[in-house]
Amino acid sequence: MERIAVVGAGLIGRAWSMVFARAGLAVALWDKVPGVAEGALGIIRDRLADLHAAGLVSEAPAAILARITPAATLAECVAGAIHVQENGPERLAPKQELFAELDRLCPPEVVLASSTSGIPASEFTGNLPGRGRCLVAHPVNPPYLVPLVELVGAPWTDPAVVARTRALMERVGQVPVTAFKETRGFVLNRLQAALVAEAFRMVRDGVMSAEDVDRCVKDGLGLRWSFMGPFETIDLNAPGGVADYVGRFGPLMGGITEEQTPYDYDAPTVEAVTAERRAALPLAGIEDRSGWRDRRLMALVAHKKGQPG
């Protein structure tokens, strides 16, 4: 059985372990904090049971869990692996240290992928002898429910490594997309940043409440965006497709973007949105609400699987 090394047993590491194990691959899971990898198995067991109940995995959860093995050391974790998925701290220095150790431990043919949300691979792999086999494979949380994975190589990443990683992600049921070059925050976060910044502006400028801005997305844009991207959306929103849409709405949309200056997340607006959210959901309820979110995502994913493309 082919083996995947998952380095870091936090939220994303646990989720990646589920993705690879449910696809039939053996997973070695390691965390630098003693006991964390072992403790992760109970959380993974519960999430697999939820997936099974939602009809998203047909295999018995216990059989999937049996493919995940905690490793006592980093060397033990990566031994015999064909792919390493790193999920360490979102800080540059620890990332540099960890990838230097991974590059030392792993044979040259092993791909070293990072789950980082925004640190380009060029910043933590440039001095490595094996830098050509390193890249970012940025998932969306939680990756066992939201399948998109952004593949972003450094300027020196071997294109064959990107191709191998894309094939692996497709094989385990994810939806990989490939960036042609590095950008700050990659692509998904840049799209998200534009919408989130505008949402804060609408509250800051007294245009709308935070609750109603959320409704604009979840009961408006989000319904279409759950199965279409922005280009297909506008292509279908005018009889003549994209060119017709731009002809009709380009001046309006362009004028809006001229008003969208950089947003600095000013403290008063952040406090106002925080107060509104805490009134709707006390901090003590976030974990339960996150479970609700995941169950809703499971239902949506199950629905989409049953629909024609």
Image (cartoon, helix red, strand yellow):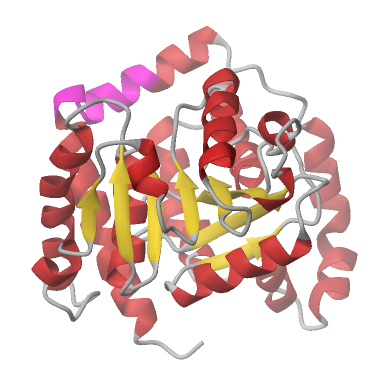
- Asked whether residue 231 is drawn in magenta, I would say no
Q: Is residue 83 left or right of residue 235?
A: left
| Magenta stretch: dominant secondary structure | helix
Residue 277 covered by magenta stretch? yes
Q: Which residues are magenta?
A: 274-284
Please provide percent x and percent y for residue 33: 27, 25
In the displayed structure image, the side of residue 25 where residue 119 appears, left or right: right
- Residue 21 in percent (x, y) is at 29, 65
Residue at 19% over, 24% down: 282
Residue shown at 59%/31% (left/top)?
A: 100
Most extreme residue toward the top, as rendered?
A: 267
Q: Which residue is at the far bottom? A: 308
Locate residue 91, reporting x and y percent. 54, 22
Q: 101 above or below 18?
A: above
247 or 110: which is nearer to us?
A: 110
Query: Residue 267's x, y, as percent?
Result: 52, 8
Residue 194 visible in image: yes
Question: What residue is shown at x 42% (from left), y 16% (from top)?
Answer: 272
Judge whether 236 appears above or below 271 on screen.
below
